[in-house]
Image (cartoon, rainbow, N blue to C red):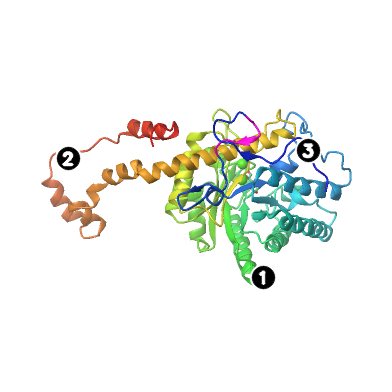
Amino acid sequence: MREYFENVSKINYEGANSKNPYSFKYYNPDEIIGDKAMKEHLRFALSYWHTLTATGADPFGVGTMIRPWDSETNEMDLAKARMEAAFELMDKLNIEYFCFHDRDIAPEGKTLQETNKNLDEIVALCKSLMKKYNKKLLWGTANCFTNPRYVHGAGTSCNADVFAYAAAQIKKAIEITKELDGENYVFWGGREGYETLLNTDMGLELDNFARLLQMAVDYAKEIGFTGQFLIEPKPKEPTKHQYDFDAATVLGFLKNYNLDKYFKVNIEANHATLAQHTFQHELHFARINKFLGSIDANQGDPLLGWDTDQFPTNIYDATLAMYEILKNGGLAPGGVNFDSKVRRASFEKEDLFLAYIAGMDTFAKGLRVAYKLLENGDLEDFIKEKYSSFTEGIGKEIVEGKVGFKELEAYALNNNPIINKSGRQELLESIVNQYIFEDHK
Ligand code: XLS
Ligand code: CA
Ligand code: CA
């Protein structure tokens, strides 16, 4: 097989003092942290779309990426070259998992039949490469947003023919995910949203979206696909208002349509911030509601209002994300998918390695810091003490449902003055900093 990245060899862990840009400083896959190896905590995945198919095009200019498969003129040869290159990348970067959309891996044909045939051919190649390199599929998904047929959405389209086409496409995507032993299947609501209510029947669109998800659940059962279904929230882009706005909105939707036992969420950092939440907020909300399934690791730019999908390098955010993930007992069968793309000006093929190393090291360091923080219990102890009034006396009676308004009024009438304690935010922030700077062992 051809070598696509001949200038880069296998990336190894060299420790924090290494000056070699092509080495891990913090990610040591087999090192045990707590009860498992770093690679099991992190379950890193490569995103096929940003890594193999992104061109660097933006609304003001064409693609800039220079890729070793650029010379392929036949669409299927191009798809095969990309597939081979993907496995070389995963192998050299020591990434165990990958994620794809159906349309990332194989080109659309003139008919659905031809498209599915293309997919089958590439899936067979993918399967043999997975075996050869010992790599796994974290999740598959269907791209129901690029083709112009999805102009009004897919499951929420006003056109029943489009709904039917989307169902057929998702059926096939679930089948190939099963064929490749995918551990999860993601629904990101591409164009499932609206631009204006002047032309939108929101009630029907939401009902139809739930119908589509129920069909997926039924079909998975029928064919024996046991992977976890995930919904990926996003508040806007491409539509002005996406229905899966954030984790809380998704939970309400799932409960409303009795779908909550079948779905968890795939939380993306940049989508959280677009919804005006921190990444930690979304992870925390999903965790306490027992539906945190997987994450898309990336970051936005606080000065830009759109989905920049940058590789995550912010150690503070990564630490707090890993803190939530540890408290969740891990992510499996989910993982940490780098839904991240190199900047348009980082167009050389080596940038792909440097970008993944940056992201993987940031999350690896985040894991190390979060583990210590959780093990020592500084934040846990503080929070426990902060809410201790609910573990005794009147607080305990409130929690146990033993008192109502009348009893509480009687208590309040005789409880004067009320004394509050400081929330100590600045102290806690400086403690987190101490852990990050490693002064706190
Ligand atoms: C787009 C989404 C998308 C999903 C998978 O903003 O992040 O890439 O992760 O369809
Ligand atoms: Ca994503
Ligand atoms: Ca994104």
Disc 3 from disc 2: Cα separation: 70 Å
Which label lies toward us, 1 or 3? 3
User: Of residues 142 and 382, which is closer to you in this image?
Assistant: 382
Q: Above or below — where is 409 with respect to 433?
A: below
Under mark 2, the amino acid is Ile
Instruction: Tell me the magenta residue range.
Output: 20-26
Disc 1 from disc 3: Cα separation: 42 Å
Earlier residue among tags 1 and 3: 3
Contact between labelled residues 3 and 1, with CB atoms less than 8 Å apart: no
Q: Dot 3: few (<14), some (14–19), or many (≥20) neighbours within 10 Å?
A: few
- Asked whether 22 falls inside the magenta stretch, the response is yes
Furthest-right residue in this view: 73
* Majority secondary structure of magenta residues: loop
Q: Residue at x 80, y 59 (%)?
A: 112
Q: Is residue 308 visible?
A: no
- Asked whether 182 falls inside the magenta stretch, the response is no
Please give the residue where the numbered disc 3 appears in the rendered image: 6
Which secondary structure lies at badge 1? helix
In-image side of 104 versus 230 (left or right): right
Using the rendered view, name the quadrant where residue 51 is placed: top right
Please give the residue where the numbered disc 1 appears in the rendered image: 223
Please give the residue where the numbered disc 2 appears in the rendered image: 418
Residue 350: % across, % down: 72, 34
